[in-house]
Image (cartoon, coloured by chain):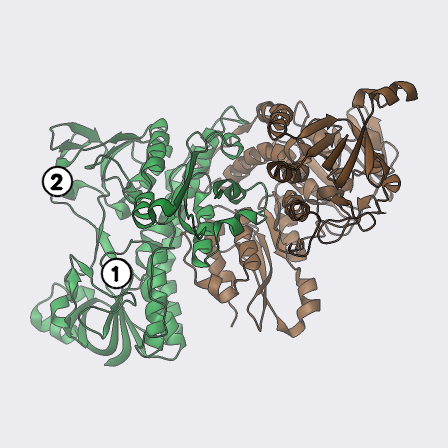
Chain colours: A green, B brown
């Protein structure tokens, strides 16, 4: 069978491309070897948010003790899990029905490249079948264009006993909240899940192989977040690299390379995620990889095979975030709608894409870091920064750790980056992203009348450029 | 004594003008007859927010019952009051110290106009003194320009027994939460304070002389908010005009013009606010009023006396909102810095100023109403609207009443208005305000990558223009 466009992966970016092309009347096939819907909906951002909203309420009530509230609501893991499952259970069939209604042909199975313009789909139940049985079940597809939206999997570090650990998907499927948890890694998953587990009563220890966590965020704000996490009973251990994991009568023991040992009921592997390209057989399709990620240009086109595009977590070197995946997918869809001609399509840039750690307070960021901005702009850089724990907006909600850093180009007054640790920063960061995308300079933003008093209305105090 | 600029009123708009002029080296006097700081800080938006943040937590925990939380934090009115007072008690002296540090001369007393370019300040303690004693205490000031930022007072309807009611300031100073409360009026103060009182356990009844509440907001969303309020036990009575108020053994009884009677521990008068111009003696200054509000042009200049400007709640016909007051103050300050020449100053428009009712969910609005947009744009208007209570973002927080309406001009794709009833709408509305102020069309906004999942990231579903 031949399709104009074949898409591998049914997550948010694969769907975005598929829907736009199908709506334009292009023949589209979509392949996935797992339940339809992708990581964000089923195992990531959306699924996680069910736990986050409950955690936020519990943390918020805790912060307001002796400021108007006494006593805390009791967390009920099972209820949240049930609600999350009620949502995720419906995603695959709803997704299938919607894609079919647009005329998209959906194949469930593993996509394996045969050549630069063909692949085969091996149905999941035949993956381990004999070659002859497999051959009869395989579907061969040829394509004018291929979009790889294969997503990512949790990284599995080579540590004895790593198979005893949970990954983020396992954590979100635990039947009960753990009483104690060790987290390997100190990125945003570690910080979000440590806050969730702690609010449900778990004793949490984060083991970080590095000297400080969250390397993609502002170091000063990260230190404030760390203080906040520690005040909630989350233990953080820097420079601790797990060497082995073994069972104990009560759970698991992690021993690090320095010989220290920690024990907990469960261990969460949050050491990162890697592009999910292992089964694609990229060499047969002349699809060049960097590590396990697909190498593409700023329009998502493969560096080695012009018929192939890639979007989302499977791309090499991109932040693994849903808005990044969607943004890249929009660009690729536009190129494909222009029959592969990218001359009129704005290339993808992740610079103005905001990201958030849903911790307490949430940490949010967009644009350049202070270091990167300093290297690029030197004396032409204004750095506005402050601890804001004494601001009214922090004090009235009992928020004891908060701050911001806003980077502005002195000569043009353009906003180069914004970094926020505060209540609702996940909403406020979008104002900065919009201002950067629309090229609105700081003085224009400073003058705007915001609804008052909101988290956004604090922005005006962050924008001075004199 | 002569000053370049005399300002009457120390609220947010009076201070904004005073500070900008003083920083430019202009001689400024500022007069207030009440503790410095104004309504927003001492009696309004900021003071109220201490109760709102606790109420939000209680309502949020209530909404999540059986979705991950069991049991509610117990509300403690006295604690919130103490924290609010700790803030408001410091405002007057902090304000005075700051204004003095900028070289502003501050007079405490009542400003009374003598002529189109002079006034007298009567110190508060001499207000009821004999004429001779008063004369010696009075200070006479002449000015090149006068800025009236007198603010507003609660409206006092002519109802027998109205003196038995509380106004919003009284409510925010109650030693304990009332067990039951009747509210006269159904504007944003009624909705915010009813939600606060209800969450602290009060039985609340809103008596509305009109057939439906919140006339400045979208009627469909208002009906949804009303359903939400009623689900929280707030009783709403349309077309009920109070005729008399009298004491009972347990509190007060309100009888309406139809003869119905309601009883409660306290009655809140929330029938509106009126500009506070009664003591100014405007005729002597040739300052024309409309009702009790000062008539000005779009640069804040008095319609009758070119030396006089007005800002904030004392202006006729403006929404009484802190961002409106500040926006107008910025315009007036700019005109005065240009020595009264307004030819290069953008006139003030309240069109892109967002407003919020801090109810549950909050109701937020910016730009034109559907009715106004329909009259102006006819067939060129796109109305995107939906009940969003089935959206994941509503379901996962147990939000049972939510919706939006976004108005877009078909030909230009410009956003004409946005109306939101949803969690964090008070933050999200700022995105629409920014887009309108910066003239960003809907398709550009639709494409932007927002931090995910946030309340702002729902925007993309509201912007379709096909």
Q: Residue at x 50, y 43 (%)?
A: A459
For residue A48, above or below residue A140: above
Q: Report in which chain the residue with disc 1 lies.
A: A
Q: Is residue B219 visible?
A: yes
Q: Report in which chain the residue with disc 2 lies.
A: A
| Residue ranking furthest to the right | B131
Whether the residues at callouts 1 and 2 have beta carbons within 8 Å, the answer is: no
- Using the rendered view, name the quadrant where residue B126 is placed: top right
Q: Position of residue A295 (x, y in %)?
A: 20, 63
For residue B201, above or below residue A373: above
Answer with left or right where residue B296 lies relative to residue A168: right
User: Is residue A374 or residue A451 the one in the foreground?
Assistant: A374
Read off the residue under disc 1: A34
User: Is residue B277 or residue A191 the one in the foreground?
Assistant: B277
Q: Position of residue B174 (x, y in %)?
A: 68, 25
Answer with left or right where residue B466 lies relative to residue A192: right
- Can you tell which mark lies on residue A161? 2
User: Is residue A452 or residue A357 the one in the foreground?
Assistant: A452
For residue A305, above or below residue B289: below
Query: Which sits earlier in the primary sequence, circle 1 or circle 2?
Result: 1
What is the count of numbered marks? Answer: 2
Give the quarter of the figure containing the N terminus of chain A: bottom left
Q: Position of residue B145 (x, y in %)?
A: 75, 41
Q: Residue at x 56, y 66 (%)?
A: B414
Q: Secondary structure at mark 1?
A: loop
Q: Residue at x 24, y 60 (%)?
A: A315
- Using the rendered view, name the quadrant where residue A227 is placed: top left
Q: Residues within 10 Å of mark 1 (few under 14, many from 20)?
A: some
Q: Secondary structure at mark 2?
A: loop
């Amino acid at each position: 069978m031949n399709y104009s466009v074949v898409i591998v992966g049914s997550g948010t970016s694969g769907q975005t491309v598929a829907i736009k092309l199908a709506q334009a009347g292009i023949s589209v096939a979509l392949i996935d070897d797992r339940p339809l819907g992708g990581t964000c909906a089923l195992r990531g951002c959306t699924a996680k948010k069910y736990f986050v909203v409950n955690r936020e309420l519990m943390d918020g009530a805790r912060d307001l003790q002796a400021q108007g509230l006494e006593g805390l609501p009791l967390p009920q893991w099972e209820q949240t899990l049930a609600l999350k499952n009620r949502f995720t259970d419906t995603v695959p069939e709803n997704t299938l029905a919607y894609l079919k209604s647009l005329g998209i042909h959906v194949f469930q199975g593993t996509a394996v490249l045969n050549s630069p313009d063909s692949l085969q789909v091996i149905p999941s139940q035949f993956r381990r079948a004999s070659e002859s049985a497999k051959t009869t079940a395989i579907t061969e597809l040829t394509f004018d264009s291929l979009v790889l939206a294969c997503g990512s999997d949790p990284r599995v570090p080579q540590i004895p006993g790593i198979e005893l650990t949970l990954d983020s998907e396992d954590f979100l499927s635990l039947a009960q909240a753990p009483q104690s948890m060790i987290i390997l890694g100190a990125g945003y998953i570690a910080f979000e899940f440590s806050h969730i587990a702690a609010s449900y009563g778990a004793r949490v220890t984060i083991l970080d192989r590095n000297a400080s966590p969250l390397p993609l965020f502002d170091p000063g704000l990260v230190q404030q977040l760390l203080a906040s996490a520690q005040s909630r009973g989350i233990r953080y251990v820097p420079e601790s690299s797990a060497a082995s994991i073994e069972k104990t009568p009560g759970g698991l023991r992690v021993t690090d390379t320095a010989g220290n040992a920690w024990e907990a009921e469960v261990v969460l592997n949050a050491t990162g995620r890697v592009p999910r390209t292992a089964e694609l057989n990229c060499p047969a399709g002349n699809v060049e990889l960097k590590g396990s990620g697909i190498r593409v240009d700023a329009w998502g086109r493969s560096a080695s095979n012009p018929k192939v595009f890639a979007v989302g977590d499977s791309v090499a070197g991109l932040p693994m975030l849903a808005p990044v995946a969607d943004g890249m997918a929009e660009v690729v869809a536009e190129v494909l709608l222009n029959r592969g001609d990218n001359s009129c399509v704005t290339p993808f840039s992740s610079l103005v894409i905001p990201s958030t750690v849903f911790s307490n307070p949430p940490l949010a960021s967009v644009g350049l870091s202070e270091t990167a901005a300093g290297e690029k702009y030197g004396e032409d850089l204004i750095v506005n920064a402050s601890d804001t724990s004494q601001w009214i907006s922090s004090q009235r909600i009992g928020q004891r750790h908060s701050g911001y850093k806003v980077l502005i180009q002195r000569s043009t007054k353009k906003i180069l980056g914004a970094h926020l640790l505060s209540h609702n920063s996940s909403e406020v960061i979008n104002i900065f992203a919009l201002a950067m995308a629309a090229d609105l300079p700081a003085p224009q933003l400073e003058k705007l009348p915001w609804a008052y008093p909101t988290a956004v209305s604090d922005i005006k105090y962050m924008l001075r450029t004199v």
